[in-house]
Amino acid sequence: MKFFIDTANLAEIKEANDLGILDGVTTNPSLMAKEGITGQENIIQHYIDICNIVDGPVSAEVIATDFEGIVREGEYLASLHKNIVVKVPMIPEGVKAIKYFTSKGIKTNCTLIFSAGQALVAAKAGATYISPFLGRLDDISTNGLDLIAQIRGIYDNYTFDTEILAASVRHPMHIIHCAEIGADVATVPLKAIKALFNHPLTDSGLAQFLADHAKGN
Ligand code: G3P
């Protein structure tokens, strides 16, 4: 299972990368705005900065919602760095653009997936990744993990290469359940990645080992 970090914060991206278990990065316009990254030039430079930190796929989202605009924007984003994955919304024009990008060898991440039907359509268009937002489904009293499991079953029935990138992951148990279900990737906030490392018995066990060692020295 691959771990991506879901942020545009460079310090957090560096910290996660330094842990040695990071495979990629996802961003979206809200995450960029949260970091105060505005204006086309700054946004583009920010993607390049992220690519210079992490040697893995970096999702950069298009703003256009029409086919020509998505293609124009996506081709430009893809030209910035070999690791850029063009993130495209799950709308008919977006799916058409994903089909086009697939034919040109440009990697895509179909975002805002909330149903199995959407996941099926995106896979048929050749999306490299699909991003089901599990936390946002949980927010409206719908089990997001059930959707990940349903999509896993559908993709395994056929020969889709599309990877399930579990998104809107909020806490460590989401990550564990995604791994149990067989999501290919989880994109996660730094806090949830770091929470995976912790266990009180590890802390107390280590303290005991060090104390016992100190007694004999
Ligand atoms: O990867 C999508 C993610 O950024 C959305 O997360 O927490 O805003 O639902 P959230």
Image (cartoon, grey):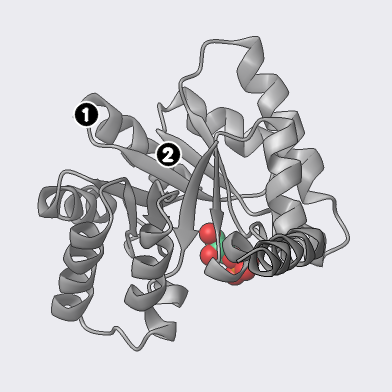
Quadrant location of residue 141? Answer: bottom right
Find ligand 1 in the image and state its quadrant.
bottom right
53 relative to 181 in the view: left or right: left
Residue under label 2, please give it: 95
Cβ at disc 1 under 8 Å from ligand 1 = no
Q: Name the one closer to the observer, 67 or 120.
A: 120
Image quarter hosting the C terminus:
bottom right
Q: Mark 1: which secondary structure?
A: loop
Residue 199, placed above or below residue 38? above
The 10 Å Cα crowd at callout 1, few under 14, some 14 to 19, many 20 or more, is few
In the rendered image, residue 61, in percent from the top left (x then y), is placed at 35, 59
What amino acid does circle 1 point to? Gly
The 10 Å Cα crowd at callout 2, few under 14, some 14 to 19, many 20 or more, is many
Residue 103, placed above or below residue 32? above
Q: Earlier in the sequence, mark 2 or mark 1?
A: 2
Q: Residue furthest right?
A: 141
126 relative to 114 in the view: left or right: left
Residue 108, placed above or below residue 46? above
Q: Mark 2: which secondary structure?
A: helix
178 relative to 146 in the view: left or right: left
